Image: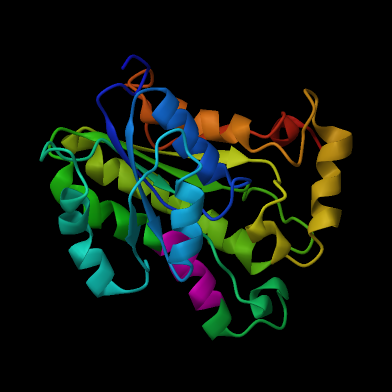
Amino acid sequence: MSGILAGKRILVTGVLTEGSIAFHAAKVAQEEGAEVILTGFGRLTLVERIAKRLPKPAPVIEMDVTNQEHLDGLADKIREHSSDASGLDGIVHSIAFGPQGAFNFLEAGWEDVATAVQVSAYSYKSLAMACLPLMERGGSVVGLTFDATIAWPKYDWMGVAKAALESTNRYLARDLGARNIRCNLVSAGPIKSMAAKSIPGFEELADVWNHRAPIGWDLSDPDPAGRGVVGLLSDFFPRTTGEIIHVDGGVHMMGA
């Protein structure tokens, strides 16, 4: 099969619905020749059902990024679902969560903040390290962020967690570069996904894009961000690492 990911094996986390960025990244990756393996947590039957809607049904591995046993066993489970033992070429980290308390900046307690940071930022490093034994020939780690240079309305401690993710990406790129592993993030604009439904005031946040995206923005279309992820997984960015690629209609460049 031809395509910019031909012959590559990619692990994709965070697929919950057909409207998720992770689903579109997995879909485009398959269309570009990759073998895709998914992970799911808590709703495995849902993920397995959605996996069948990809161009090629993909196996699903249970994984909770806060469970060290799951992380320790991840490499072996990936091997079980691989067509051969040639390893892993790419990882898509599409994992973020903040308890409701994390969306009240002044009132949030440390427990809620710690959960948001662990799941949304620390897990980026945890996932990469869990897969490291499979990436002896190098590869690409791609995560998803939401521009953390801005104090967005309603986003509160999730914005802080995304800032931590962006910093984590730079340090991971520094430490894994010698292994020929690139680490980059796609900063996407707001998408009407299941994750978005958990953000209080999401509509107010998303309304910024209706007025300020120079090239336009469609809240219901995760495909551009998914394609950005696949581009970074490919060999077309062989010396790009520690970066944040904006796929947000240009909102990031507009002044206040």
At a point 86% along the width and 55% down the height, the residue shown is 204
* Magenta region: 113-122
Quick check: 197 above or below 141?
below
Viewer can see residue 76: yes
> Of 65 and 220, which appears nearest the observer?
220
The stretch drawn in magenta includes residue 120: yes
At a point 64% along the width and 75% down the height, the residue shown is 102
On-image quarter of the C terminus: top right
The secondary structure making up most of the magenta span is helix
Position of residue 124 measured from the top left corner of the image (x, y, whole percent):
38, 55
Quick check: 240 above or below 77?
above
Position of residue 201 measured from the top left corner of the image (x, y, whole percent):
82, 63
Left or right, residue 134 beside residue 170: left
Quick check: 167 above or below 46?
above
> Of 210 and 13, which appears nearest the observer?
13
On-image quarter of the N terminus: top left
> Of 81 and 29, which appears nearest the observer?
81
> Of 219 and 49, which appears nearest the observer?
49
Q: Indicate the quadrant where residue 39 lies.
A: bottom left
Left or right, residue 33 beside residue 96: left
Viewer can see residue 14: no
Left or right, residue 27 beside residue 135: right
Q: Colour scheme of this structure image?
A: rainbow
At a point 72% along the width and 29% down the height, the residue shown is 249
Position of residue 30 measured from the top left corner of the image (x, y, whole percent):
40, 30
